Image (cartoon, coloured by chain):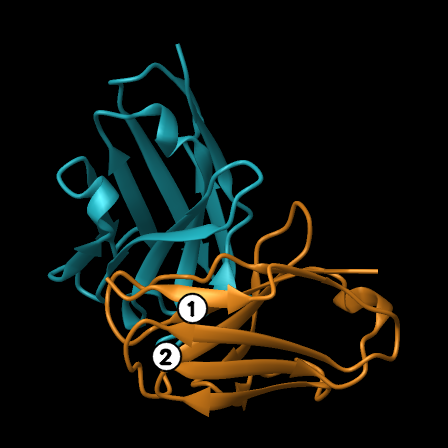
Amino acid sequence: EVQLVESGGGLVQPGGSLRLSCAASGFTFNNHYMTWVRQAPGKGLEWVANINRDGSEKNYVDSVKGRFTVSRDNAKNSLYLQMNSLRDEDTAVYYCARDGGSRRVDYWGQGSLVTVSS
Amino acid sequence: DIQMTQSPSSLSASVGDRVTITCRASQSISRYLNWFQQKAGKAPNVLIYGASTLQSGVPSRFSGSGSGTDFTLTISSLQPEDFATYYCQQSYSTPRTFGQGTKVEI
């Protein structure tokens, strides 16, 4: 059974940093692109970043470029999102998701809430 | 970035109704279009990918069509468990933008 479990969310002050982790199991992790998607409270979905199978290619939405870094450790079956210079507007539930081929996300984690507030 | 616009933003329907949601891309995305369903407090689930391919395990009352810039999600006979918010997403290029969502209410 495919499982994605996020951790590392919490309350952080504006300008602060946080690192999200996503532990993957139930599939061959290094065979899949991985994606981060976020959802602000009461709002829609926003694609944040993705990373290819070996971590050599990363893509970001403009609003997080230069502040967020996506990475992965295939030996540990883990995906990460390092978030620096956090802003109020980064407050959201962050989902880790697997790209199942054909450019679609087919499995999602349960989400990790990040709250940026003073 | 490619902008995705869904319509309507919300709709009211009854069990058994045929429901259609449209999604328009700001430029051609070929058939790189996915549809997701999200229920309150839960992660989204993929329904349709490649504009018209039904994800395994998804009921056949869901269908998708379209190519280029205009796409449609149809629910042929709305069931109680289908009341949710639906999102389209383009996977033609990064950032892989979502539409703003369509809430289907009773």
Question: Pointer 2: what residue?
Answer: A101
Question: Pointer 1: what residue?
Answer: B89
Left/right placement of residue A42 relative to residue B34 reads right
Q: Callout 2: residue from which chain?
A: A
The cyan-coloured chain is labelled A
Left/right placement of residue B53 relative to residue B81 reads left
Q: Residue at x 23, y 62 (%)?
A: B1
Residue B96 sits in quarter:
bottom left
Q: Amino acid at mark 1?
A: Gln
Percent x, y of residue A83: 26, 33
Q: Amino acid at mark 2?
A: Gly
Give whichever of B101, A85 is nearer the camera: B101
The orange-coloured chain is labelled B
On the question of residue B55 being in view, the answer is: no
Mark 2 near mark 1, Cβ–Cβ under 8 Å? no
Point out the residue furthest to the right here: B15
Residue A85 sits in quarter:
top left
Percent x, y of residue A7: 44, 36
